[in-house]
Amino acid sequence: MLEGYAWIVLILASFRLTRLLIHDEITSWVRRPFVQVKEELHDGQPVLYLEPIGTGLRKWTGMLLSCYWCMGVWTTSFLYAGWLVWPSLFVYIAHILALAGAAAILESLVRLVSDR
């Protein structure tokens, strides 16, 4: 069983990996075959969202790549299973993602405070 520290690392790593796959530009090539970016106006502001395309497995993958909650389950499962099965590798992957996730959260907080 994992201890408290490991859980915190896995939580932050799962957060960052999920955001990486769903939102970051660097992984847009992964999403492109499965989703298209749509824009809608909400209260006069443009809001972008991902819409699954295709049918069958392609559409299912698009649904997964456009749903933060769904992708979160899979990224968490991947990292947790990897940590248990191959800890000598996944401990490094999880720590890198966790540090990046913590940095992203801190940057969001700094922007929030500076925008006031």
Image (cartoon, rainbow, N blue to C red):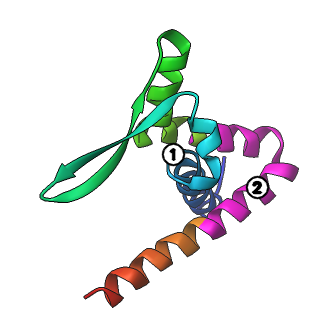
Kind of element beneath mark 2: helix
Three-letter amino acid code of the residue under disc 1: Ile
**Magenta segment range?**
76-100
Residue closest to the eye, 113 or 95 = 113
Residue 76 higher or lower than 19, as above or below: above
Residue closest to the eye, 10 or 59 = 59
Dominant secondary structure of the residues highlighted in magenta in the image: helix
Residue furthest toward the right? 88
Label 1 environment density (alpha carbons within 10 Å; few <14, some 14–19, many ≥20) = many
Residue drawn at 64 percent across, 41 percent down: 29
Report x, y in % for residue 84.
75, 42
For label 1, the residue is: 22
Decide which of tag 1 and tag 2 comes sooner along the chain: 1
Kind of element beneath mark 1: helix
Horizontal side of 3 relative to 68 (left or right) equals: right
Residue drawn at 65 percent across, 70 percent down: 99
Q: Write down the quadrant of residue 4 in the picture.
A: bottom right
Horizontal side of 114 relative to 104 (left or right) equals: left
Residue 86 appears anywhere in the view: yes
| Tally of numbered discs | 2
| 46 inside magenta stretch | no
Three-letter amino acid code of the residue under disc 2: Ile
| 97 inside magenta stretch | yes
Q: Write down the quadrant of residue 116 in the picture.
A: bottom left
For label 2, the residue is: 93
The label number, if any, that marks residue 94 in the structure image: none
Report x, y in % for residue 98.
63, 63
Residue drawn at 16 percent across, 53 percent down: 42
Report x, y in % for residue 31.
57, 37
Residue drawn at 54 percent across, 48 percent down: 18
Horizontal side of 75 relative to 95 (left or right) equals: left
